[in-house]
Image: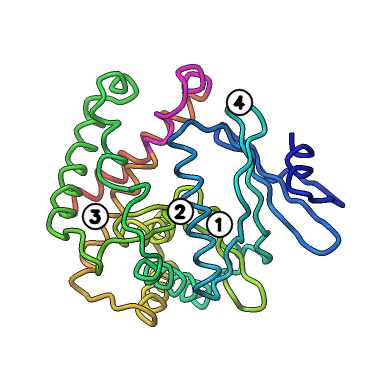
């Protein structure tokens, strides 16, 4: 199917390499004589197609309006029933897990701020939305209750109530709500010649800017220590170097980190029952880890 897609895009590959595959998509790196691309093959219903088209529209606008290093997409093509493809330029660089520094986190913060500022330039106000329902509604479905203990469900419910109250307090003004990537973690960032590049906009949409920031901060707070505390400060400094972020807004960030932790325990609920059963041990471990962190969060309030 990858060869068929590349033929449809009129691309002559020199080398094709599988980057990742899961239930959501299969992604290849495609090298040509002059350019490196990523090719994503994905099954999609109507909602998934809306999400993919929104991703393409925003990435195209980011290329037109900014100098941010993000993928430059082409149009979606249909390969067969319920299978689609999209081709994008490859974001060159290397991940910096072992050599991570405050400078890298400063640039991640600045990137986030530039992305959030682009809301005003993009012009659209409707699209896929990372709201309370997207994160917490799965916990309200009785069919999902069997995956959680009563104590775990109570923890998620209490966190959900806090998140809902905070979102209501914040409202949806342009200073707090707009376009977000929603998945800027260290796997989706590379650095080249001192500049950050970010990819995998597949879950982008509208949401609270704090939702976006919480993804990065959550990674830093997974195992807090002196270094990660400094990294968090550098990230926020980078954000503030581009966009206003007052202290009264920062105080809400832990609530959105808690929402991110809760979301990490619900992603599998979109899987089929067979897939859930296949990975039952991994899913139980994910739920237990999330519930433990959220219990610690609630204890600090």
Q: Sort mark 1 into few (<14), some (14-19) or many (20+) by Cα contacts within 10 Å.
A: few
Position of residue 141 measured from the top left corner of the image (x, y, whole percent): 26, 24
Q: Which residue is drawn at 68% across and 59% down?
A: 90
Query: How much space separates mark 4 and mark 3, taking CA atoms?
Result: 41 Å
Q: Residue 255 carries which label?
A: 3
- Does the segment drawn in magenta span residue 277? yes
Position of residue 223 measured from the top left corner of the image (x, y, whole percent): 42, 56
**N-term mark: 4 or 1:** 4
As rendered, which of 95 and 15 lies closer to the eye? 15
Residue that mark 2 sits on? 183
**N-term mark: 2 or 3:** 2
Query: How much space separates mark 4 and mark 1, taking CA atoms?
Result: 30 Å
Q: Which residue is drawn at 27% across and 25% down?
A: 149
Q: Which residue is drawn at 63% across and 62% down?
A: 95
**N-term mark: 1 or 2:** 2
- Callout 3: SS: helix
Q: Residue at x 63, y 41 (%)?
A: 77
Q: Which mark is residue 188?
A: 1
């Amino acid at each position: 199917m990858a060869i068929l897609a590349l033929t449809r895009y009129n691309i002559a590959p020199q080398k094709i390499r599988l980057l990742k595959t899961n239930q959501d998509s299969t992604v290849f790196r495609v090298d040509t004589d002059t350019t490196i691309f990523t090719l994503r093959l994905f099954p999609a219903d109507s909602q998934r197609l809306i999400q993919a088209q929104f991703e393409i529209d925003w990435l195209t606008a980011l290329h037109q309006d900014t100098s941010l290093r993000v993928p430059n997409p082409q149009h979606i093509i249909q390969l067969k029933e319920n299978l689609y493809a999209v081709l994008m330029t490859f974001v060159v660089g290397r991940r910096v897990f072992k050599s991570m520094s405050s400078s890298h986190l400063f640039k991640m913060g600045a990137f986030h701020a530039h992305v959030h500022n682009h809301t005003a330039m993009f012009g659209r106000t409707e699209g896929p939305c990372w709201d309370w329902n997207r994160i917490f509604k799965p916990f309200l479905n009785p069919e999902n209750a069997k995956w959680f203990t009563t104590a775990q469900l109570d923890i998620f419910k209490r966190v959900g109530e806090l998140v809902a109250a905070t979102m209501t307090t914040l409202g949806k003004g342009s200073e707090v709500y707009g376009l977000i990537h929603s998945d800027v973690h260290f796997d989706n960032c590379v650095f080249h010649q001192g500049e950050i590049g970010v990819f995998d906009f597949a879950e982008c949409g509208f949401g609270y800017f704090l939702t976006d920031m919480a993804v990065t901060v959550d990674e830093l707070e997974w195992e807090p220590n002196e270094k990660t505390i400094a990294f968090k400060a550098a990230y926020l400094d980078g954000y503030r170097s581009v966009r206003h972020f007052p202290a009264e807004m920062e105080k809400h960030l832990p609530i959105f980190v808690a929402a991110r932790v809760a979301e990490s325990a619900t992603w599998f609920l979109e899987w089929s029952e067979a897939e859930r059963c296949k990975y039952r041990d991994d899913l139980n471990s994910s739920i237990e880890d999330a519930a433990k962190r959220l219990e610690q969060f609630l204890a600090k309030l």
